[in-house]
Image (tube, helix red, strand yellow):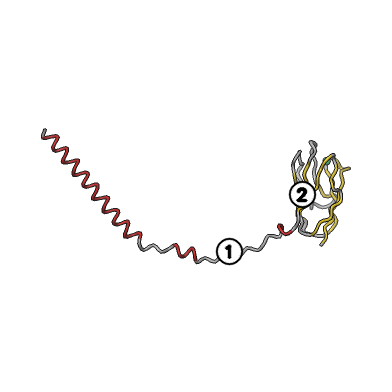
Amino acid sequence: MKKGLVIAIVIFLIVVGVFAVIKLTTKTNQTTDSPEITSQENNSQEPEVTSPPEVSSGKVHEVRIKGSTFTPSLLNVKMGDTVKWTNWDSMSHTVTSDTGNELDSELLSKDGSYSHVFSVPGTYNYHCTPHPYMKARIIVEA
Ligand code: CO
């Protein structure tokens, strides 16, 4: 009976002690919370000035690769325009410049596509590497 009373008192003291510690820690937290006014620094930052991307100004032209033919075979575009080739054939094809390396696609499997932005005016003759008879031309105007 005495033992039980001692245990009860010890538990009571522990509970009181725990409450006291919790009260102390919440009080110290409150005092450290108040002087924080650091968020205003972020608001005063000037917005980043980014120049508009050159790519997005132009049109996107589609060339279809179907029946081992580039369609249209002759395409006139403006400087800054994008040309997108899509392979409709089950056979794989490439989009490859006859001279230079302006156009240099991977081997495009069915539904594969290749896009290129033309930034220099000129005439660009291209072909398909596995099928050299597949020939077409892009003319880029200023
Ligand atoms: Co081909």
Q: Position of residue 55 (x, y in %)?
A: 71, 57
Residue closest to the far right: 133
Locate residue 40, reporting x and y percent.
45, 65
> Residue flagged by tag 1: what amino acid is it?
Glu
Q: Is residue 29 above or below residue 133?
A: below
Look at 76% across and 58% down and name the residue there: 80
Callout 2: helix, strand or loop?
strand
- Give the image quadrant in which the ligand numbered 1 is located: top right
48 left or right of 127 in image = left
Q: Which mark is residue 48?
A: 1
Residue at the image point whose x is 29% and y is 53% from the top: 25
Residue drawn at x 30%, y 57% as measured from the top left? 28
| Inter-mark Cα distance, 2 to 1 | 32 Å
The amino acid type, in three-letter code, at marker 2 is: Lys
* Quadrant of the image containing the N terminus: top left
The residue where tag 2 is placed is 84
How far across and down, in percent of the image, does residue 102 sit?
79, 53
Q: Residue, x 75% and y 58% (percent of image)?
A: 58
Is the residue indicated by label 2 positioned so its CB lies within 8 Å of ligand 1?
Answer: no
